[in-house]
Amino acid sequence: MSLGTLVTAGGQLYTGLAGKAEADSAANMEKYNAQVELRRKHMIEQRGKSASILQAKAASRGQSSLVARMAASGGVVQTGSYLEVLGAQAIESERENLMIGYDTQVAASQAQSAADLHKMQASIYKQKGKNLMTAAFITAGTSLLQGFGGSGGGGKDTVGGKPRSMDFHEYRRTMSNHGSRLGGGMTTSGGGGN
């Protein structure tokens, strides 16, 4: 096996590692963005709750003030147009409070959706990193196998002096055999990773 084969395989592994590191970095950024959106959702909910309480208190004060003004003008608050005015103000106050709740719910839901999207994107980047590493190992392994086959000048790994193709399971067996000959610890158990 030539030095060029080793350099090629090393370069392929390095490219895979660099791609995985970049994908992991992007995944971490997406996870951070998801946390930011969840914090924003919490702040929106707290702000909405406070706004609703403040609006209800202000409406109650306004209602009391209106009743006091009506009574001071000599009107009977529980009858006629006075009662209609009080009822209309109560309805308007309740509508404002409901709109605060609705706006809060919409904004919080948007923040939650953004957080979920960032989490999904993080998992896509994480899988991309794993795929890049798998591809790098396969490509580097293929280069090494071709180097081993070419160095023997023939034999079962070559057809007409050229490397022959093999399926995935045969490739793993071959890599395991080469690893044991070199004293390595390669296995064929299909081990995992991050």
Image: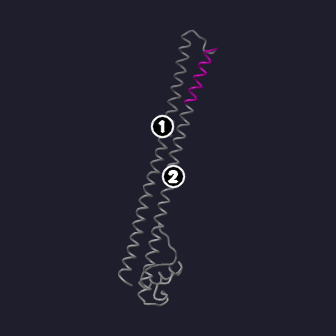
Number of the front mark, 2 or 1: 2
From the image, give the main secondary structure of the stretch colored magenta: helix
In this view, which residue lies farthest toward the front? 160
Q: Which of 147/194 is in front?
A: 147
Residue 117: give its label: 2
Residue 60 position within the rendered picture, expressed as x and y whole percent measured from the top left = 54, 24
For the residues labelled 2 and 1, say whether their Cβ atoms are less than 8 Å apart.
Answer: no
Question: Which span is picked out in magenta?
Answer: 80-96
Residue 28 position within the rendered picture, expressed as x and y whole percent measured from the top left = 43, 57
Horizontally, is 179 left or right of 100 in the view? left
Which residue: 49% across, 43% down? 42
Q: Which of 143/174 is in front?
A: 143
Q: Which of 9/114 is in front?
A: 9
The quarter of the picture where the N terminus appears is bottom left
In this view, which residue lies farthest toward the left? 3
In this view, which residue lies farthest toward the top? 74
Q: Which residue was labeled with disc 1? A: 47
In the rendered view, tell whether residue 25 sits above or below residue 79. Answer: below
Q: Amino acid at mark 2?
A: Leu
Q: Secondary structure at mark 1?
A: helix
